Amino acid sequence: MYTVITFIAFTAFVAFYSWFKLRKQKLSSKDGYFLGGRSLTGVVIAGSMLLTNISTEHLIGMNGSSYKNGFIIIAWEVTSALALVAAAIYFVPRYLKMGLTTIPQYLEKRFDSTTRTLVALFLMISFVVTLLPIVLYTGAINIESIFNVSEVFQVSKEEGLWITVVLIGALGSVYAIFGGLKAVAISDTINGYGLLLGGLLIPLLALISIGDGNPLEGLSKVYLKNPEKFNVIGEKDSVLPFGVLFTGLIINQLYFWCMNQTIIQRAFGAKNLVEAQKGLLFTGVLKVLIPLVIILPGVIGFYYFGDALYDNQDMIYPELIKKVLPVGLVGVFAAIILGAVLSTFNSVLNSAATIFSIDIYKRHLGKNSSDKVLVKVGKLTSTILAVFAILVAPMVANAPDGLYQLLQQLNGIFFIPIASIMLAGFFLKNISAAGAKASLFVGLLFYILTTFVFKVDIHFVHLWGIEFLLNIGVMFCVSHFYPQGKEYIQEDFHIVEMNAWKYTKPMAISLCAITVLIYVFLGKNY
Protein backbone atom coordinates (compact mmCIF):
# COMPACT_ATOMS: atom_id res chain seq x y z
CA MET A 1 0.00 0.00 0.00
CA TYR A 2 2.86 2.37 0.87
CA THR A 3 4.38 1.69 -2.56
CA VAL A 4 1.13 2.74 -4.27
CA ILE A 5 0.85 5.93 -2.17
CA THR A 6 4.42 7.09 -2.95
CA PHE A 7 3.90 6.22 -6.64
CA ILE A 8 0.71 8.32 -6.86
CA ALA A 9 2.24 11.18 -4.85
CA PHE A 10 5.31 11.55 -7.10
CA THR A 11 3.30 11.18 -10.32
CA ALA A 12 0.83 13.83 -9.09
CA PHE A 13 3.70 16.17 -8.16
CA VAL A 14 5.17 16.00 -11.69
CA ALA A 15 1.73 16.63 -13.24
CA PHE A 16 1.03 19.59 -10.93
CA TYR A 17 4.47 21.14 -11.49
CA SER A 18 4.10 20.83 -15.28
CA TRP A 19 0.64 22.48 -15.11
CA PHE A 20 1.96 25.25 -12.85
CA LYS A 21 4.83 26.10 -15.23
CA LEU A 22 2.49 26.03 -18.24
CA ARG A 23 -0.52 27.88 -16.87
CA LYS A 24 0.41 31.20 -18.55
CA GLN A 25 1.91 29.74 -21.73
CA LYS A 26 0.33 30.40 -25.12
CA LEU A 27 -0.01 27.01 -26.77
CA SER A 28 -2.24 28.01 -29.67
CA SER A 29 0.63 29.14 -31.95
CA LYS A 30 2.73 26.77 -34.06
CA ASP A 31 6.02 27.59 -32.28
CA GLY A 32 4.30 27.66 -28.88
CA TYR A 33 2.83 24.16 -29.22
CA PHE A 34 5.44 22.34 -31.29
CA LEU A 35 8.66 24.07 -30.09
CA GLY A 36 7.82 25.26 -26.57
CA GLY A 37 7.85 28.88 -27.77
CA ARG A 38 11.58 28.59 -28.61
CA SER A 39 12.31 29.21 -24.93
CA LEU A 40 14.02 26.01 -23.74
CA THR A 41 17.21 26.28 -21.66
CA GLY A 42 20.22 23.96 -21.62
CA VAL A 43 19.22 22.17 -18.41
CA VAL A 44 15.70 21.51 -19.72
CA ILE A 45 17.01 20.39 -23.13
CA ALA A 46 19.48 17.94 -21.55
CA GLY A 47 16.94 16.49 -19.11
CA SER A 48 14.34 16.14 -21.84
CA MET A 49 16.79 14.63 -24.36
CA LEU A 50 17.99 12.10 -21.78
CA LEU A 51 14.50 10.99 -20.83
CA THR A 52 13.24 10.98 -24.42
CA ASN A 53 16.13 8.66 -25.22
CA ILE A 54 16.24 6.57 -22.02
CA SER A 55 12.99 4.79 -21.45
CA THR A 56 12.02 1.33 -20.33
CA GLU A 57 13.26 -0.19 -23.57
CA HIS A 58 16.67 0.75 -22.10
CA LEU A 59 16.01 0.01 -18.43
CA ILE A 60 14.44 -3.34 -19.31
CA GLY A 61 15.98 -4.12 -22.69
CA MET A 62 19.60 -3.05 -22.14
CA ASN A 63 19.83 -4.42 -18.59
CA GLY A 64 18.36 -7.64 -19.95
CA SER A 65 20.99 -7.66 -22.69
CA SER A 66 23.89 -6.85 -20.31
CA TYR A 67 22.67 -9.63 -17.98
CA LYS A 68 23.18 -11.98 -20.90
CA ASN A 69 26.06 -10.34 -22.80
CA GLY A 70 27.87 -8.04 -20.38
CA PHE A 71 29.34 -4.57 -20.96
CA ILE A 72 29.91 -5.18 -24.68
CA ILE A 73 26.66 -3.30 -25.38
CA ILE A 74 28.06 -0.08 -23.83
CA ALA A 75 28.81 1.06 -27.40
CA TRP A 76 25.14 2.02 -27.86
CA GLU A 77 25.57 4.62 -25.10
CA VAL A 78 29.08 6.06 -24.91
CA THR A 79 29.45 6.61 -28.66
CA SER A 80 26.38 8.85 -28.39
CA ALA A 81 28.68 11.44 -26.78
CA LEU A 82 30.66 11.70 -30.06
CA ALA A 83 27.47 12.27 -32.06
CA LEU A 84 26.29 14.92 -29.57
CA VAL A 85 29.60 16.74 -30.06
CA ALA A 86 28.95 16.74 -33.83
CA ALA A 87 25.40 17.99 -33.21
CA ALA A 88 26.60 20.86 -30.98
CA ILE A 89 29.44 22.01 -33.23
CA TYR A 90 28.12 21.40 -36.75
CA PHE A 91 24.47 20.44 -37.20
CA VAL A 92 22.40 22.43 -34.68
CA PRO A 93 23.98 25.83 -35.53
CA ARG A 94 22.84 25.27 -39.12
CA TYR A 95 19.37 24.12 -38.09
CA LEU A 96 18.84 27.17 -35.89
CA LYS A 97 19.99 29.51 -38.66
CA MET A 98 17.36 27.96 -40.94
CA GLY A 99 14.67 28.35 -38.25
CA LEU A 100 13.53 24.74 -38.70
CA THR A 101 10.53 23.19 -36.99
CA THR A 102 11.05 19.74 -38.56
CA ILE A 103 13.94 17.84 -40.17
CA PRO A 104 11.98 17.24 -43.42
CA GLN A 105 11.85 21.06 -43.87
CA TYR A 106 15.61 20.99 -44.44
CA LEU A 107 15.23 18.29 -47.07
CA GLU A 108 12.85 20.46 -49.08
CA LYS A 109 15.32 23.35 -48.96
CA ARG A 110 18.24 21.11 -49.97
CA PHE A 111 16.47 18.76 -52.44
CA ASP A 112 12.76 19.16 -53.25
CA SER A 113 9.25 18.92 -51.78
CA THR A 114 8.78 15.25 -52.76
CA THR A 115 11.88 14.24 -50.78
CA ARG A 116 10.48 16.13 -47.79
CA THR A 117 7.13 14.33 -48.04
CA LEU A 118 8.71 10.89 -48.47
CA VAL A 119 10.92 11.30 -45.40
CA ALA A 120 8.01 12.65 -43.38
CA LEU A 121 6.02 9.51 -44.26
CA PHE A 122 9.02 7.27 -43.45
CA LEU A 123 9.29 8.93 -40.03
CA MET A 124 5.59 8.59 -39.28
CA ILE A 125 5.69 4.87 -40.11
CA SER A 126 8.85 4.31 -38.04
CA PHE A 127 7.25 5.98 -35.00
CA VAL A 128 4.10 3.88 -35.18
CA VAL A 129 5.58 0.53 -36.18
CA THR A 130 8.75 0.45 -34.06
CA LEU A 131 9.23 2.92 -31.24
CA LEU A 132 5.79 3.58 -29.73
CA PRO A 133 4.71 -0.08 -29.28
CA ILE A 134 8.06 -1.19 -27.77
CA VAL A 135 8.16 1.77 -25.36
CA LEU A 136 4.63 1.01 -24.18
CA TYR A 137 5.21 -2.71 -23.81
CA THR A 138 8.48 -2.42 -21.86
CA GLY A 139 6.86 0.15 -19.59
CA ALA A 140 3.96 -2.20 -18.98
CA ILE A 141 6.35 -5.05 -18.05
CA ASN A 142 8.00 -2.91 -15.37
CA ILE A 143 4.83 -1.42 -13.88
CA GLU A 144 2.95 -4.75 -13.99
CA SER A 145 5.86 -6.48 -12.26
CA ILE A 146 6.21 -3.88 -9.48
CA PHE A 147 2.50 -3.54 -8.70
CA ASN A 148 1.33 -7.03 -9.69
CA VAL A 149 -1.50 -5.51 -11.75
CA SER A 150 -2.68 -8.95 -12.85
CA GLU A 151 -3.16 -10.02 -9.23
CA VAL A 152 -4.90 -6.78 -8.25
CA PHE A 153 -7.45 -7.17 -11.06
CA GLN A 154 -7.45 -10.98 -10.74
CA VAL A 155 -6.66 -11.53 -14.41
CA SER A 156 -3.94 -13.38 -16.34
CA LYS A 157 -0.42 -11.92 -16.79
CA GLU A 158 -1.19 -11.11 -20.44
CA GLU A 159 -4.42 -9.32 -19.53
CA GLY A 160 -2.58 -7.44 -16.78
CA LEU A 161 -0.07 -6.20 -19.36
CA TRP A 162 -2.91 -5.10 -21.65
CA ILE A 163 -4.49 -3.09 -18.82
CA THR A 164 -1.13 -1.48 -17.97
CA VAL A 165 -0.45 -0.63 -21.65
CA VAL A 166 -3.84 1.12 -21.93
CA LEU A 167 -3.31 3.11 -18.71
CA ILE A 168 0.21 4.23 -19.65
CA GLY A 169 -0.83 5.09 -23.21
CA ALA A 170 -3.80 7.15 -22.03
CA LEU A 171 -1.75 9.07 -19.44
CA GLY A 172 1.12 9.75 -21.86
CA SER A 173 -1.30 11.02 -24.48
CA VAL A 174 -2.62 13.69 -22.10
CA TYR A 175 0.81 15.36 -21.80
CA ALA A 176 1.52 15.32 -25.53
CA ILE A 177 -1.97 16.28 -26.72
CA PHE A 178 -2.83 19.06 -24.29
CA GLY A 179 0.55 20.50 -23.31
CA GLY A 180 2.70 20.30 -26.44
CA LEU A 181 6.51 20.23 -26.33
CA LYS A 182 6.82 22.53 -23.30
CA ALA A 183 4.75 20.19 -21.10
CA VAL A 184 6.77 17.23 -22.34
CA ALA A 185 10.08 19.02 -21.68
CA ILE A 186 9.16 20.26 -18.19
CA SER A 187 7.93 16.87 -16.97
CA ASP A 188 10.97 15.26 -18.62
CA THR A 189 13.35 17.49 -16.68
CA ILE A 190 12.03 16.33 -13.29
CA ASN A 191 11.73 12.68 -14.31
CA GLY A 192 15.05 12.73 -16.21
CA TYR A 193 17.16 13.76 -13.26
CA GLY A 194 15.00 11.57 -11.01
CA LEU A 195 15.76 8.63 -13.30
CA LEU A 196 19.49 9.35 -13.15
CA LEU A 197 19.52 9.56 -9.33
CA GLY A 198 17.05 6.70 -8.76
CA GLY A 199 18.73 4.61 -11.43
CA LEU A 200 22.14 5.08 -9.77
CA LEU A 201 20.62 4.09 -6.44
CA ILE A 202 19.73 0.56 -7.71
CA PRO A 203 23.31 -0.62 -8.42
CA LEU A 204 24.65 1.33 -5.42
CA LEU A 205 22.31 -0.42 -2.96
CA ALA A 206 23.02 -3.76 -4.61
CA LEU A 207 26.79 -3.28 -4.39
CA ILE A 208 26.53 -2.12 -0.75
CA SER A 209 24.61 -5.30 0.03
CA ILE A 210 27.04 -7.55 -1.87
CA GLY A 211 30.08 -5.82 -0.31
CA ASP A 212 28.69 -5.89 3.27
CA GLY A 213 28.45 -2.10 3.41
CA ASN A 214 31.32 -1.29 1.02
CA PRO A 215 30.13 -0.70 -2.60
CA LEU A 216 33.69 -0.93 -4.00
CA GLU A 217 34.11 -4.31 -2.33
CA GLY A 218 30.74 -5.31 -3.83
CA LEU A 219 31.86 -4.23 -7.31
CA SER A 220 35.08 -6.21 -6.86
CA LYS A 221 33.08 -9.33 -5.97
CA VAL A 222 30.81 -8.93 -9.01
CA TYR A 223 33.87 -8.44 -11.24
CA LEU A 224 35.87 -11.37 -9.83
CA LYS A 225 32.94 -13.74 -10.23
CA ASN A 226 32.48 -12.95 -13.95
CA PRO A 227 35.29 -10.67 -15.28
CA GLU A 228 34.31 -11.41 -18.89
CA LYS A 229 31.02 -9.53 -18.33
CA PHE A 230 33.00 -6.26 -18.03
CA ASN A 231 34.84 -6.59 -21.34
CA VAL A 232 33.73 -3.94 -23.89
CA ILE A 233 35.58 -5.48 -26.85
CA GLY A 234 34.14 -8.99 -27.03
CA GLU A 235 34.36 -11.54 -29.82
CA LYS A 236 33.52 -11.21 -33.53
CA ASP A 237 30.30 -13.16 -33.02
CA SER A 238 29.17 -11.24 -29.91
CA VAL A 239 25.86 -9.38 -29.78
CA LEU A 240 27.64 -6.10 -30.63
CA PRO A 241 31.17 -6.72 -32.01
CA PHE A 242 33.77 -3.99 -31.53
CA GLY A 243 34.11 -3.60 -35.30
CA VAL A 244 30.61 -2.15 -35.66
CA LEU A 245 31.88 1.10 -34.10
CA PHE A 246 33.64 1.78 -37.39
CA THR A 247 30.87 0.70 -39.77
CA GLY A 248 27.16 1.27 -39.20
CA LEU A 249 27.07 2.31 -35.53
CA ILE A 250 28.52 5.78 -36.04
CA ILE A 251 26.03 6.42 -38.90
CA ASN A 252 23.17 5.40 -36.63
CA GLN A 253 24.44 7.62 -33.80
CA LEU A 254 24.83 10.62 -36.09
CA TYR A 255 21.27 10.11 -37.31
CA PHE A 256 19.80 9.60 -33.85
CA TRP A 257 21.43 12.60 -32.13
CA CYS A 258 21.80 15.01 -35.06
CA MET A 259 18.83 14.30 -37.36
CA ASN A 260 16.14 12.43 -35.41
CA GLN A 261 13.08 14.68 -35.05
CA THR A 262 12.10 13.27 -31.64
CA ILE A 263 15.50 14.18 -30.16
CA ILE A 264 16.61 17.25 -32.08
CA GLN A 265 13.23 18.99 -31.70
CA ARG A 266 14.39 19.98 -28.20
CA ALA A 267 17.34 21.86 -29.71
CA PHE A 268 15.01 23.48 -32.27
CA GLY A 269 13.12 24.87 -29.26
CA ALA A 270 16.23 26.42 -27.62
CA LYS A 271 16.08 30.12 -26.79
CA ASN A 272 19.51 30.63 -28.44
CA LEU A 273 22.57 28.74 -29.70
CA VAL A 274 24.30 28.92 -26.30
CA GLU A 275 21.44 27.04 -24.59
CA ALA A 276 21.22 24.52 -27.44
CA GLN A 277 24.95 23.71 -27.21
CA LYS A 278 24.84 23.53 -23.40
CA GLY A 279 21.92 21.11 -23.61
CA LEU A 280 23.56 18.87 -26.23
CA LEU A 281 26.94 18.65 -24.50
CA PHE A 282 25.45 18.14 -21.05
CA THR A 283 23.40 15.32 -22.59
CA GLY A 284 26.74 13.87 -23.74
CA VAL A 285 27.97 13.90 -20.12
CA LEU A 286 24.78 12.13 -18.99
CA LYS A 287 25.16 9.51 -21.74
CA VAL A 288 28.65 8.65 -20.47
CA LEU A 289 27.20 8.14 -16.97
CA ILE A 290 24.05 6.29 -18.00
CA PRO A 291 25.68 2.82 -18.39
CA LEU A 292 25.74 2.77 -14.57
CA VAL A 293 21.91 2.82 -14.77
CA ILE A 294 21.14 0.68 -17.80
CA ILE A 295 24.07 -1.78 -18.07
CA LEU A 296 25.71 -2.31 -14.66
CA PRO A 297 22.43 -3.48 -12.98
CA GLY A 298 22.09 -6.28 -15.54
CA VAL A 299 25.60 -7.55 -14.75
CA ILE A 300 24.81 -7.33 -11.02
CA GLY A 301 21.62 -9.26 -11.75
CA PHE A 302 23.75 -12.08 -13.18
CA TYR A 303 25.70 -12.14 -9.90
CA TYR A 304 22.44 -12.53 -7.97
CA PHE A 305 20.40 -14.79 -10.24
CA GLY A 306 22.97 -16.61 -12.39
CA ASP A 307 21.45 -17.91 -15.63
CA ALA A 308 18.02 -18.57 -14.06
CA LEU A 309 16.43 -15.82 -16.18
CA TYR A 310 18.32 -16.48 -19.45
CA ASP A 311 15.12 -17.41 -21.22
CA ASN A 312 13.35 -14.33 -19.87
CA GLN A 313 16.10 -11.70 -19.81
CA ASP A 314 13.70 -8.74 -19.93
CA MET A 315 12.52 -9.57 -16.38
CA ILE A 316 15.97 -9.08 -14.79
CA TYR A 317 15.60 -5.36 -14.01
CA PRO A 318 12.14 -5.55 -12.37
CA GLU A 319 13.40 -8.47 -10.25
CA LEU A 320 16.50 -6.52 -9.20
CA ILE A 321 14.39 -3.49 -8.19
CA LYS A 322 12.21 -5.61 -5.94
CA LYS A 323 15.29 -7.26 -4.44
CA VAL A 324 17.37 -4.19 -3.50
CA LEU A 325 15.02 -1.19 -3.07
CA PRO A 326 13.39 -0.46 0.31
CA VAL A 327 9.58 -0.67 0.11
CA GLY A 328 9.15 3.09 0.60
CA LEU A 329 11.32 3.89 -2.43
CA VAL A 330 9.81 1.31 -4.79
CA GLY A 331 6.77 3.54 -5.38
CA VAL A 332 8.87 6.64 -6.10
CA PHE A 333 11.12 4.73 -8.50
CA ALA A 334 8.11 3.15 -10.18
CA ALA A 335 6.79 6.70 -10.74
CA ILE A 336 10.14 7.71 -12.25
CA ILE A 337 10.05 4.64 -14.51
CA LEU A 338 6.53 5.60 -15.53
CA GLY A 339 7.88 9.09 -16.26
CA ALA A 340 10.56 7.56 -18.49
CA VAL A 341 7.90 5.66 -20.42
CA LEU A 342 5.64 8.69 -20.69
CA SER A 343 8.54 10.87 -21.77
CA THR A 344 9.55 8.78 -24.77
CA PHE A 345 5.94 8.01 -25.61
CA ASN A 346 4.70 11.60 -25.50
CA SER A 347 7.87 12.93 -27.16
CA VAL A 348 7.34 10.63 -30.12
CA LEU A 349 3.66 11.60 -30.27
CA ASN A 350 4.61 15.29 -30.23
CA SER A 351 7.22 14.80 -32.97
CA ALA A 352 4.82 12.75 -35.10
CA ALA A 353 2.15 15.43 -34.68
CA THR A 354 4.67 18.12 -35.64
CA ILE A 355 5.79 16.28 -38.78
CA PHE A 356 2.25 15.43 -39.90
CA SER A 357 0.92 18.96 -39.28
CA ILE A 358 3.85 20.90 -40.79
CA ASP A 359 5.21 18.54 -43.45
CA ILE A 360 2.11 16.73 -44.66
CA TYR A 361 -1.15 18.47 -43.69
CA LYS A 362 -0.11 22.10 -44.30
CA ARG A 363 1.65 21.28 -47.57
CA HIS A 364 -0.89 18.89 -49.13
CA LEU A 365 -4.25 19.17 -47.37
CA GLY A 366 -4.60 22.64 -45.88
CA LYS A 367 -2.08 25.01 -47.46
CA ASN A 368 -3.64 28.15 -45.95
CA SER A 369 -4.22 26.68 -42.48
CA SER A 370 -3.74 28.98 -39.50
CA ASP A 371 -1.54 28.07 -36.52
CA LYS A 372 -4.69 27.27 -34.54
CA VAL A 373 -5.81 24.71 -37.13
CA LEU A 374 -2.32 23.15 -37.28
CA VAL A 375 -2.32 22.72 -33.49
CA LYS A 376 -5.77 21.03 -33.67
CA VAL A 377 -4.51 18.70 -36.43
CA GLY A 378 -1.47 17.91 -34.28
CA LYS A 379 -3.66 16.98 -31.31
CA LEU A 380 -5.87 14.74 -33.46
CA THR A 381 -2.78 13.04 -34.96
CA SER A 382 -1.39 12.35 -31.48
CA THR A 383 -4.71 10.83 -30.41
CA ILE A 384 -4.94 8.47 -33.41
CA LEU A 385 -1.31 7.34 -33.09
CA ALA A 386 -1.69 6.75 -29.35
CA VAL A 387 -4.68 4.45 -29.90
CA PHE A 388 -2.84 2.54 -32.63
CA ALA A 389 0.29 2.11 -30.47
CA ILE A 390 -1.80 0.78 -27.58
CA LEU A 391 -3.33 -1.86 -29.88
CA VAL A 392 0.02 -2.93 -31.37
CA ALA A 393 2.17 -2.88 -28.17
CA PRO A 394 1.54 -6.46 -26.88
CA MET A 395 2.56 -7.89 -30.28
CA VAL A 396 6.27 -7.18 -29.63
CA ALA A 397 6.53 -9.70 -26.76
CA ASN A 398 9.14 -12.48 -26.73
CA ALA A 399 11.73 -10.91 -29.03
CA PRO A 400 14.47 -13.62 -29.31
CA ASP A 401 17.46 -11.29 -28.68
CA GLY A 402 15.62 -9.00 -26.28
CA LEU A 403 13.46 -5.95 -26.88
CA TYR A 404 16.30 -3.44 -27.23
CA GLN A 405 17.99 -5.49 -29.96
CA LEU A 406 14.62 -5.81 -31.76
CA LEU A 407 14.11 -2.02 -31.56
CA GLN A 408 17.52 -1.35 -33.11
CA GLN A 409 16.96 -3.86 -35.91
CA LEU A 410 13.62 -2.27 -36.78
CA ASN A 411 15.05 1.26 -36.56
CA GLY A 412 17.58 0.39 -39.27
CA ILE A 413 14.75 0.10 -41.80
CA PHE A 414 14.23 3.86 -41.78
CA PHE A 415 17.16 5.48 -39.96
CA ILE A 416 20.00 4.61 -42.35
CA PRO A 417 18.28 5.70 -45.61
CA ILE A 418 17.33 9.04 -44.02
CA ALA A 419 20.81 9.48 -42.48
CA SER A 420 22.36 8.83 -45.90
CA ILE A 421 20.49 11.60 -47.69
CA MET A 422 20.87 14.02 -44.75
CA LEU A 423 24.66 13.56 -44.64
CA ALA A 424 24.88 13.73 -48.44
CA GLY A 425 22.80 16.92 -48.36
CA PHE A 426 25.21 18.58 -45.94
CA PHE A 427 28.55 17.36 -47.29
CA LEU A 428 28.12 16.47 -50.98
CA LYS A 429 27.09 19.45 -53.11
CA ASN A 430 26.50 17.50 -56.32
CA ILE A 431 23.88 15.09 -54.98
CA SER A 432 20.50 15.76 -56.61
CA ALA A 433 16.91 15.27 -55.47
CA ALA A 434 16.54 12.35 -57.89
CA GLY A 435 19.61 10.69 -56.36
CA ALA A 436 18.28 11.21 -52.84
CA LYS A 437 14.87 9.70 -53.65
CA ALA A 438 16.42 6.71 -55.43
CA SER A 439 18.71 5.93 -52.49
CA LEU A 440 15.79 6.07 -50.05
CA PHE A 441 14.07 3.16 -51.78
CA VAL A 442 17.21 1.20 -52.67
CA GLY A 443 18.43 1.40 -49.07
CA LEU A 444 15.03 0.43 -47.69
CA LEU A 445 14.76 -2.60 -50.00
CA PHE A 446 18.37 -3.71 -49.35
CA TYR A 447 17.98 -3.69 -45.56
CA ILE A 448 14.61 -5.45 -45.48
CA LEU A 449 15.87 -8.18 -47.85
CA THR A 450 19.18 -8.77 -46.04
CA THR A 451 17.76 -8.59 -42.49
CA PHE A 452 14.25 -10.02 -42.60
CA VAL A 453 13.96 -12.05 -45.84
CA PHE A 454 17.27 -13.75 -46.74
CA LYS A 455 18.91 -13.63 -43.27
CA VAL A 456 22.43 -12.79 -44.47
CA ASP A 457 25.07 -13.91 -41.96
CA ILE A 458 26.38 -10.39 -41.30
CA HIS A 459 25.69 -8.43 -38.11
CA PHE A 460 22.85 -5.98 -38.73
CA VAL A 461 24.98 -2.98 -37.67
CA HIS A 462 27.58 -3.94 -40.31
CA LEU A 463 24.65 -4.07 -42.75
CA TRP A 464 23.91 -0.46 -41.81
CA GLY A 465 27.44 0.49 -42.91
CA ILE A 466 27.15 -1.47 -46.15
CA GLU A 467 23.75 0.09 -46.82
CA PHE A 468 25.14 3.58 -46.21
CA LEU A 469 27.90 3.04 -48.80
CA LEU A 470 25.35 1.56 -51.22
CA ASN A 471 23.09 4.59 -50.74
CA ILE A 472 25.96 7.01 -51.38
CA GLY A 473 26.89 5.06 -54.53
CA VAL A 474 23.30 5.15 -55.79
CA MET A 475 23.11 8.91 -55.14
CA PHE A 476 26.31 9.57 -57.08
CA CYS A 477 25.19 7.43 -60.04
CA VAL A 478 21.67 8.84 -60.29
CA SER A 479 22.86 12.41 -59.69
CA HIS A 480 25.31 12.03 -62.60
CA PHE A 481 22.44 11.33 -65.01
CA TYR A 482 19.85 13.55 -63.28
CA PRO A 483 21.83 16.47 -61.82
CA GLN A 484 20.49 19.09 -59.43
CA GLY A 485 19.15 22.14 -61.29
CA LYS A 486 20.31 24.78 -58.79
CA GLU A 487 22.94 25.04 -56.07
CA TYR A 488 21.62 25.12 -52.50
CA ILE A 489 22.60 28.19 -50.47
CA GLN A 490 21.80 28.16 -46.77
CA GLU A 491 19.97 31.23 -45.49
CA ASP A 492 20.08 32.75 -42.01
CA PHE A 493 16.58 33.76 -40.84
CA HIS A 494 17.86 35.40 -37.60
CA ILE A 495 15.20 33.73 -35.44
CA VAL A 496 17.38 33.18 -32.36
CA GLU A 497 20.70 34.60 -31.16
CA MET A 498 23.57 32.65 -32.74
CA ASN A 499 26.58 33.36 -30.47
CA ALA A 500 28.33 30.07 -29.61
CA TRP A 501 28.81 28.85 -26.01
CA LYS A 502 32.39 29.61 -24.89
CA TYR A 503 32.91 26.15 -23.36
CA THR A 504 31.79 24.19 -26.42
CA LYS A 505 35.27 23.15 -27.58
CA PRO A 506 36.68 22.16 -24.13
CA MET A 507 33.54 20.14 -23.39
CA ALA A 508 33.68 18.49 -26.81
CA ILE A 509 37.35 17.49 -26.41
CA SER A 510 36.69 16.13 -22.90
CA LEU A 511 33.76 13.98 -24.05
CA CYS A 512 35.79 12.50 -26.93
CA ALA A 513 38.70 11.73 -24.58
CA ILE A 514 36.44 10.08 -21.98
CA THR A 515 34.86 7.87 -24.65
CA VAL A 516 38.29 6.64 -25.80
CA LEU A 517 39.45 6.05 -22.20
CA ILE A 518 36.39 3.88 -21.46
CA TYR A 519 37.46 1.53 -24.25
CA VAL A 520 41.10 1.61 -23.16
CA PHE A 521 40.34 0.66 -19.55
CA LEU A 522 37.44 -1.76 -20.07
CA GLY A 523 38.97 -3.42 -23.11
CA LYS A 524 42.37 -4.26 -21.61
CA ASN A 525 41.42 -7.83 -20.66
CA TYR A 526 40.54 -8.69 -24.26
Image: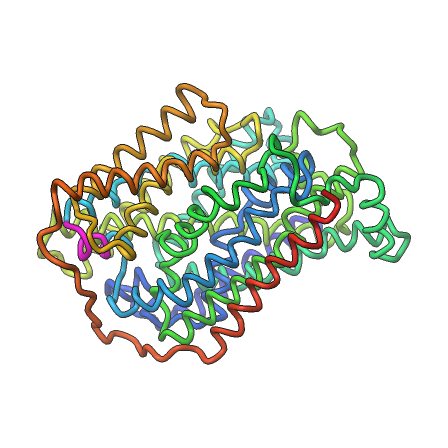
Q: Magenta segment: does it hold 108?
A: yes
Identify the residue shown where x is 59% and y is 26%: 155
Residue 318 position by quadrant: top right
Residue 105 position by quadrant: bottom left
Q: Nearer the viewer, residue 426 or 394?
A: 426
The residues colored magenta run: 105-112
Q: Is residue 27 left or right of residue 366?
A: right
The colour scheme used to paint the residues is rainbow
Identify the residue shown where x is 50% and y is 77%: 503
Identify the residue shown where x is 41% and y is 19%: 454
* Residue 100 x %, y %: 26, 62
Q: Is residue 116 above or below residue 288?
A: above
Q: Is residue 79 above or below residue 499?
A: above
The secondary structure making up most of the magenta span is: helix
Query: What is the quadrant of the C terminus in the image?
Result: top right
Q: Is residue 5 visible?
A: no
Q: Is residue 306 visible?
A: yes
